[in-house]
Amino acid sequence: MLNKPSIERIINAALEFGDFAEVFCERNVKSLITANSQKVETSSTGVEAGTGVRIFRGLDEIYVYTSGYSEDKIIKILKDTVGSLKNDSSFSTPTFAAATNYNRFQGELHTSVNYGRKLEIVNRALIAGKEYSSDIGQMFARYFDMCQDVVIANSEGIYAEDKRVKTRMLITAYAQGKNGVASGWQGPGAMKGFEFYTTLNIEDYAKEAARIAINMSNAEKCRGGRMPVIVANGFGGLIFHEACGHSLEASAVAIGTSEFSGKLGQTVASPLLTLVDDGTVDGAWGSLAVDDEGTPTQKNVLIENGVLKSYMIDKLNARRMATPSTGSGRRQNYRFAPTSRMTNTYIEGGVTNPDEIIANTERGLYVSYINGGSVNPATGDFNFAATESFMIENGKIAAPVSGATLIGNGLQVLKDVDMVGNNPKLGEGFCFAGSGALFISAGQPTVRVSEMTVGGVK
Amino acid sequence: MNPYTNAVTKKAIAQGITQLHFHIEDIKKQELTTLNGEIEFISASNETLVLIEGEYNGYIGSAYTEDCDESTIMSLLENIIQTATQNKVPYIEKSIHTLNVPTNRSIPFNTKEIAEKLITAEKTARESVKNIEVFRSGLVHHQKTITLVNSDGKSMSDMVSYFSVSTNIMTKDGEQTQSARKHMLFESVADVDLTAFIIKAAREASQMLNSQPCASGNYKVVLQNNVTAELFGAFLPAFQADKCQNKMSFLMDKLGDVVSSTHFIAYEDPSSLIHRCFDDEGTLTSKKALINEGKLSNYFHNNDTGQKAKQQSTGNGFRQNYNESISSAYTNVVIKIGKDSLTDLIKNTGSGILITSCDGIFAGVNPTSGDFSVISKGYMIKDGALAEPISGITIGGTLFDILSATEECGNDSITINSNTGIVSAPSIRLSSVVVTGV
């Protein structure tokens, strides 16, 4: 990686074109294994390595990056790109602090684990899923690990170093049933070393993926309409990630393209709801000690008992909003300028037993697992697709239905939450937005929305 | 790259690794974004990404790097040995033709000129469209040179180069907020009317103010070109032969079956914006039908899936990312245009709905089962003309429903990104679609 004198020279060169300069340098040793029941499809091991330089000119942003670690190359790209935008007056050379090292990792580094041990975990999942039932046509596993070393330095004197160690196993089962081909998935992950796999039973996850696939391949297609919706605990919390999480990111709030702009202190949700984004959760998939701008992460209470308390703020939008960063500046890798993004975002647990929530719903949709979704932060209109869902009839879970999509408006759904369970849980996934694909957790207890539009396929 | 590939080859042979094959991507990207009439973001990059494959004891192993420093070579070779030893995938010889398409084309990206074009387009839009609150537009030039090299020194290379423009406009009227997000791809800035593209998006954002959901039911529907492209593009993984052979696609065992009305014709053309003379396995590419005369005509095959199906590769052996193994994928997929303009399609609909945008495609489209259900916006069509705007609805069904319900294709093709490739599609009229509203 680039050394400190080199990074300091790049920052000084960048300050010829703006009033703030930052260097992000990373070396990320990654392994990816994808395999089906017959063979290893992808076996990708190697190094992601590169350098990004960011400049602020007031509220304008300049970002250049290159693979590798060449001081001369990055400065040349910078000058070729913005050479005509040289500052009228010069900024004084900053004083760089001693490096702050945020690395507290004590587990088993993935880089020290033989490839064969990783492949064994993959094979255990594939075998367990296939053996679950003869109706499973195919099992697919995607094992991923990374050891990302980063240096983040800026003209304010920050010089941060960290090592991010993560791993995740995505297991997908495919089944052919009476209503066609369907899939089910499970994706446990953590900010942990290879010891993560000694604490979980990978076979149980594979069997659950297989059960979902078989269930959905035999399910009738969902008929759409307006109805109460209960979303189970865990990664179902993605509903709030979409419904209001993105709209609470400063990238939307600061320029007025969020429905939550200017509403701090106002009641925006049911008093049953407290929404948190917390990058410090120990070992969680969405955690990181320091964000990608060199600011330590923190627990941000966004909505407390229905009242809007805070936004998620990065450095550039902190300028726009004249408020400090909340440690929310994130990026996928050196190819992206950071912006405000979520980490581990969850609804805190309530008091109601989840069985009571179902028993109190005469007819509606129960979503046990969700797939993914998206939101338009300007309008708050969001959608997400169910991986597995069931109709609720007479207060009981009834027949499974496939192809259900939930749509709604963030502000409206927040107000329409009328029951919150006492079983909070986090789930793991990815979020795709402006600064790339990020590892995030989403979580919640079982939650009921009094009425939503369920999009069907018949 | 020669000094680096030579150094790797020399050290690899000393470790017992032979038959080296390099996949090298040189990527340049330039970008400019404007926000509310001013430059907001300027970016440029230059990357060199290298994947190395080699034979070790009869098996193939691989490793990749973005740091072409000779000090890292030994750890890469260790990765090759470990993956070869553990995966036990037999090495199969890769063919490299000597084929070098000129890759020294230089596309000017004049920051000042592009900023002026975007800002002028915004100004024009603001003059003719009411209630605009936030206006963001961006233009990006993508350039990628792909080179395949083997340890004999043979190489083949090709270059992909195109622009993309995007615009995201928010409108507001009292408490009502709406927005429109559009993007399209093109070869040269001189070939497109950026102002017309941006004004169209601004009008849509403005006209959507005060929109309401319509009643649930089955409607005759026109999908605007961008919606056709996004929806069909999201189903394209189902055409991958590996997905079909592994029972992960609803299109398995359907080759030659009637799956569509004869009005819907789709093909892949590797000579368009994503210009690829050869795929990532070195197989020469060619134009091929996907859906023709109502029948499923082809899957995307690589060498491995072709061998299983007892046919040749279709030249679709591509890597999803440079550092992954060969899968099957596509370059440019085109839905054939018809004769009618969008106005004619609407006129001939009588009563129905025009869908102008969909969100959540990646989650709402299931390329395994063939189902889709996506949040949508558009207009009611009454007496062959656009009537009130509608939003907060979903359209749903299966890909087969769309294909078999296609009555007519328009002449208004648009090209957009889709998965790892791109899709060009016109507006289409469908005889019946399930709409969930109120």
Image (cartoon, helix red, strand yellow):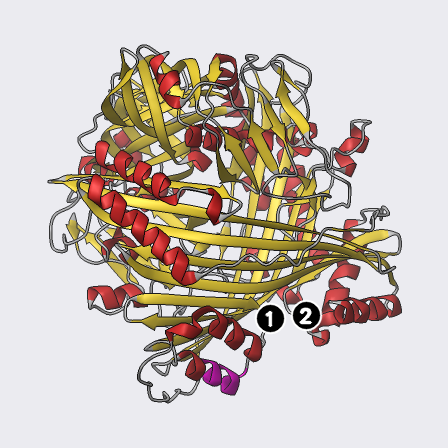
Tags 2 and 1 touching, CB below 8 Å: yes
Magenta range is A3-10
The quadrant of the rendering that contains the N terminus of chain B is bottom right
SS under mark 1: loop
Q: Is residue A22 visible?
A: yes
Residues B355 and B236: in front is B355
A100 falls in the magenta region = no
Q: Position of residue B182 (x, y in %)?
A: 38, 40
The quadrant of the rendering that contains the C terminus of chain B is top left
The residue at 40%/58% (across/down) is B113
SS under mark 2: loop
Q: Quadrant of residue B255?
A: top right
Vertical relation: B383 (above or below) A455: above
How far is the residue under mark 2 from the one under mark 1? 7 Å
Q: Quadrant of residue A295?
A: bottom left
Q: Is residue A267 left or right of residue A173?
A: left
What's the chain of the residue with tag 2? B
Q: Is residue A307 left or right of residue B400?
A: left
- Magenta region, mostly helix, strand or loop? helix
Residue that numbered label 2 is attached to: B68
Q: Position of residue B64 (x, y in %)?
A: 68, 60
Other residues around mark 1 within 10 Å, as few (<14) / some (14–19) / many (≥20):
many
Vertical relation: A381 (above or below) A23: above
Q: Amino acid at mark 1?
A: Gly
Residues B70 and A232: in front is B70
The residue at 70%/72% (across/down) is B72
A4 falls in the magenta region = yes
Q: Which mark is residue A68?
A: 1
Q: Which mark is residue A248?
A: none
What's the chain of the residue with tag 1? A
